[in-house]
Image: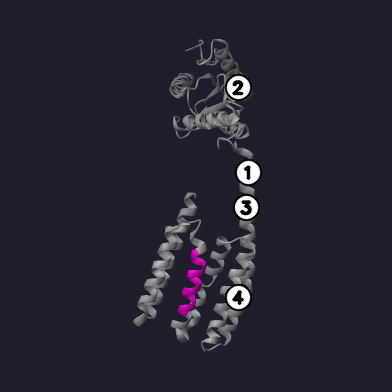
Amino acid sequence: MDRLARVLYGVAWVGLPLGIAVQLWIFPPGPWAWVYGVFALVFLMALLKGPREAPRYLTHAVGAYLLFELWHSEADWVGVGFFVPAVYLLAAFAYRLPWALAFGFLWGAALVAAPWALGRETGLEWAHFVLAQPVLLALTLLLARFRELHGQARFWREQALTDPLTGLPNRRALEMALEKEAARVERGEKPFSLILLDLDDFKRVNDEKGHPEGDRLLQEVARHLVAHVRRGDLVARFGGEEFAILLPATDCLRAERLAERLKEGLAARGVTASFGVALYQGSLEALLQKADQALYRAKGLGKNRVVRDTEGCGLQGTR
């Protein structure tokens, strides 16, 4: 959940107890104090479920609480209506269609009928309250539908940019990140480096131990790479048994040192890989080509080594 969502989530949780506190100040609980204690416990339990699960619990908890307040407030029940939209909002976030509409309608109908059933004065205020409910229900429909469409769009966007086996960004995501870094360099920031690595003799693993073991190995390598780069670096699956690491604001020497550490860490796990290192110098196409050429020089020199691009990184380094 991003920072703004966390702030809004916090505001909702601050607003709920403040609203109840105002209600208690206007209408002292008297012998019904224990009921407020029960609701407070239910709200707290919902809070502990987290932002994803809390709305499902709160839809019904808030609906029940508002019914109680309609009864407890007696002649001043109209003030409770200010909080009724919260039930519809919670239903829209808690449930998919048509359940969001069903529960919104259920609690809306109960809250509309309550003043009449309790014998409260049902003049223009009640009529206004009744007319507001279809509007709120329609907004529930729109919000729930928007939420579903947004979720679907997010799902397909993430699927399009994520490798399903390793969970790493895929080649398309890497290309987008490279374009972003290139734009930063054009604005005057430091150049970045790219590491390409290819697992040595991976085909033998698949042939001798089977593809499930090969998949497990790729997942293990992915976890190792992510765990041993900086927070701002990007590890991506470039294709097959090949991975790429984008290192923002990093020169060739530092990139080469990181590649050496990664090579040694993989070797300690019984995995060998060949690495190619290149520095961005104004062309993404050239960057990928140079990193790829360095990688295949590492393969040709006996595998399990790091080679950097001779043109962009100075003299060739091999280890």
Measuring from the top left, give residue 87's x and y in whole percent: 53, 69
Among numbered discs 3 and 1, the one appearing first in the sequence: 3
Q: In the rendered view, would you say 216 is above or below 141?
A: above
Question: Which mark sits nearer the N-terminus, 2 or 3?
Answer: 3
Q: Residue at x 39, y 69 (%)?
A: 40
Looking at the image, tell me whether mark 3 or mark 4 is earlier in sequence order.
4
- CA distance for labels 2 and 3: 40 Å
Q: Is residue 94 visible?
A: yes
Residue highlighted by disc 3: 150
Closer to the eye: label 4 or 2: 2
Q: Which residues are magenta?
A: 57-69
Q: Amino acid at mark 4?
A: Ala
Mark sitting earlier along the chain (4/2): 4
Q: Gap between marks 1 and 2, in whole Å?
A: 31 Å
Residue to which mark 4 is pinned: 132
Q: Nearer the viewer, residue 62 or 8?
A: 62
State if disc 2 and disc 4 touch (CB < 8 Å).
no
Q: Nearer the viewer, mark 2 or mark 3?
A: 2
